[in-house]
Image: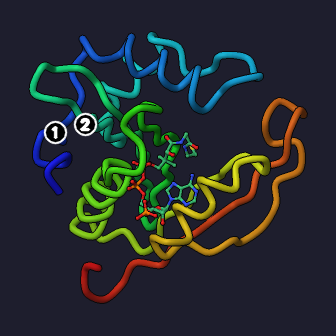
Amino acid sequence: MAVIAEHEIALARSADAQAIAELSREAIEYGLPWRWTPSRVLLALHDPSTNVVVSRRGDHLLAGFAIMQYGNETAHLALLAVRDAARRQGLGSALLAWLEATARVAGIQALRLEVRASNPGAMAFYGRHGFVESGVRVGYYEGVEDAIRMTKALGGQPS
Ligand SMILES: CC(C)(COP(=O)(O)OP(=O)(O)OC[C@H]1O[C@@H](n2cnc3c(N)ncnc32)[C@H](O)[C@@H]1OP(=O)(O)O)[C@@H](O)C(=O)NCCC(=O)NCCS
């Protein structure tokens, strides 16, 4: 808890785009072409149907971020990453909780995401947060790797 208290979660600013894109490249897109470049993150920041949230320390260092895209009934968690040195301290859970609460207020019925088939740690993280596997998307990552699709029904009271 003490570690979370040292961090704030807030909507990202344009100045965060570079750090977000670099963290995506190293923590999520490793071994793949870099798709979430700074310019794409900037577009997401200015897209009214997308939330980009960051977790930062008091000294403003970006510790993690998440990007969620909202449809009419479902929301897609496009990216979520926490810096290596800041993992297993609750930050990923805090970012996800922020987005999930926002989705509930927006009347979203379900969250969905894809995770690399070679990433059991992330699957365990999402499983811990109520996501269940709902399919495989063969070759989803540039034909290099399959994706495991995971979903979470919202509805009812906030968890
Ligand atoms: C997945 C990720 C976002 C989790 O962030 P985090 O801040 O470390 O997560 P939390 O500390 O909130 O973890 C909460 C719980 O999730 C589970 N969990 C998290 N990481 C896990 C791992 N690597 N292996 C198994 N379970 C894990 C645990 O139950 C953990 O509780 P515990 O630490 O008390 O055991 C982080 O590991 C990460 O950035 N990974 C690289 C990028 C990535 O895979 N993103 C997701 C796919 S886009």
Residue at image position (41%, 32%) is 85
Q: Are marks 2 and 1 in contact (CB under 8 Å)?
A: yes
Q: Nearer the viewer, mark 2 or mark 1?
A: 1
Q: Can you tell me whether the CB of the residue at mark 2 lies under 8 Å from the nearest atom of ligand 1?
A: no
Residue at image position (32%, 35%) is 52
Which numbered disc flags the more N-terminal residue, 2 or 1? 1
Disc 1 marks a residue whose amino acid type is His
Residue at image position (62%, 54%) is 121
Disc 2 marks a residue whose amino acid type is Ser
Dividing the image into 4 quarters, which one contains the N terminus? bottom left
Q: Residues within 10 Å of mark 2 (few under 14, many from 20)?
A: many
Left or right: residue 30 compared with residue 154: right
Residue at image position (21%, 67%) is 105
Scheme by which the image is coloured: rainbow
What residue did someone put label 1 on? 7
Left or right: residue 13 compared with residue 22: left
Res 146 label: none
Dividing the image into 4 quarters, which one contains the C terminus? bottom left
Asked which quadrant contains residue 103, the reply is: bottom left
